[in-house]
Amino acid sequence: MVENPSFGRKLFVAANYAVLLALAFVCLFPLVHVLAVSFSSSGAAAAGRVGLWPVEFTTKAYAFVLGKEEFVRSFGVSVRRLVLGTALNMALCVLIAYPLSKETRDFKLRTVYVWYFFVTILFGGGLVPTYMTVKNTGLMDTIWALVLPNAVPVFNVILVLNFFRGLPKELEEAAFIDGAGHMRTLWSLYVPLSKPVLATVLLFTMVGHWNAWFDGLIYMNDPTRYPLQSYLQTIIINQDVSAMSDSDVELMKQLSNQTVKAAQIFLGAMPIVVVYPFLQKFFVKGIVLGSVKG
């Protein structure tokens, strides 16, 4: 610890704070601006008078969005996808990473399976074969079409695998001496000790499921089954109002398209924004410790 920092040290620290504050502002500005627009009047938003603070504060846009059956339904689809997909991804990730973290003398086919999974990172099946597989297995227009094709995120498996390999072998040997089997050792020893990497993988998984929109468009023939991001993509990006009723279109004219879009975008981003602070403290530690062990 430096008790009497030099002028150069103070300048360096001040420059660091300045750069970090600038980066934080750049990252937060879009979200804060969208929030301000969503709470502003239609006239202020259309005139471009909204910056970081709402102009002519109103909550009509949120009342309209939360009252829309399509938005609420697609939000529910995304929540179901998030819960099912995250649970499945995390369970499979841990169950695959544990045996692959063993030495070859303990699991003779370890190298074969490692390469089997690693090749899937280098080469993908492609959109058309994946679509045909989902269609021929009868998963179209079901929640499982959004969950099963990406049930095993190999990058996350590698992170967890490397973290497991870094845990002291003596702990596992002590567990075996006490009579624990592999499953008991995994869930009672490895998982509790791996909170940093599991929290990191959990964040990756949640963000991936929540932000995914393309698979909803190609695997769901019925727009009423769209997850939230697919619904927002059709309304906001493609300007497709065919899924909206005549009364919704009239209200959109009164409220302003910009404020309604801003409200939908902010509501769509909120779940991840709320969850991230609770997992952030594990994020860097999980990435570093899960990526340096061979």
Image (cartoon, rainbow, N blue to C red):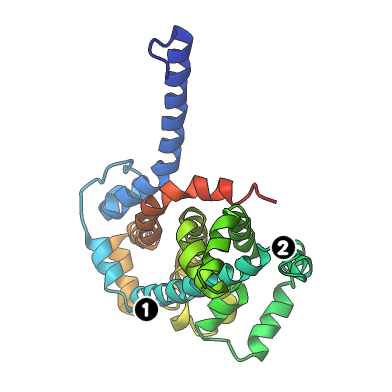
Q: Nearer the viewer, residue 83 or 128?
A: 83
Q: Does residue 90 show up?
A: no
CA distance separating discs 2 and 1: 34 Å
Q: Which residue is mark 1?
A: 73
Q: Report helix, strand or loop for mark 1.
A: helix
Q: Report helix, strand or loop for mark 2.
A: helix
Dot 2 alpha-carbon crowd within 10 angstroms: few under 14, some 14 to 19, many 20 or more? few
Q: Nearer the viewer, residue 150 or 42?
A: 150
Labelled disc at residue 121: 2
Q: Quadrant of the N terminus?
A: top left
In the rendered structure, which disc, 2 or 1, sits on the residue that comes first in sequence? Answer: 1
Q: Nearer the viewer, mark 2 or mark 1?
A: 2
The amino acid marked with disc number 2 is Ile
Give the side of residue 59 with respect to residue 149, left or right.
left
Q: Nearer the viewer, residue 154 or 109?
A: 109
Q: Can you give x and y, in whole percent of width and height, for residue 261 in the image?
A: 38, 60
Labelled disc at residue 149: none
Q: Nearer the viewer, residue 181 or 77?
A: 181
Dot 1 alpha-carbon crowd within 10 angstroms: few under 14, some 14 to 19, many 20 or more? some
Residue 220, located in which quarter of the rendered image?
A: bottom right
Q: Can you give x and y, in whole percent of width and height, for residue 229 in the image?
A: 47, 67
Q: Does residue 250 show up?
A: yes
Q: Can you give x and y, in whole percent of width and height, for residue 161 in the image?
A: 62, 60
Q: Can you give x and y, in whole percent of width and height, for residue 7 in the image?
A: 44, 8
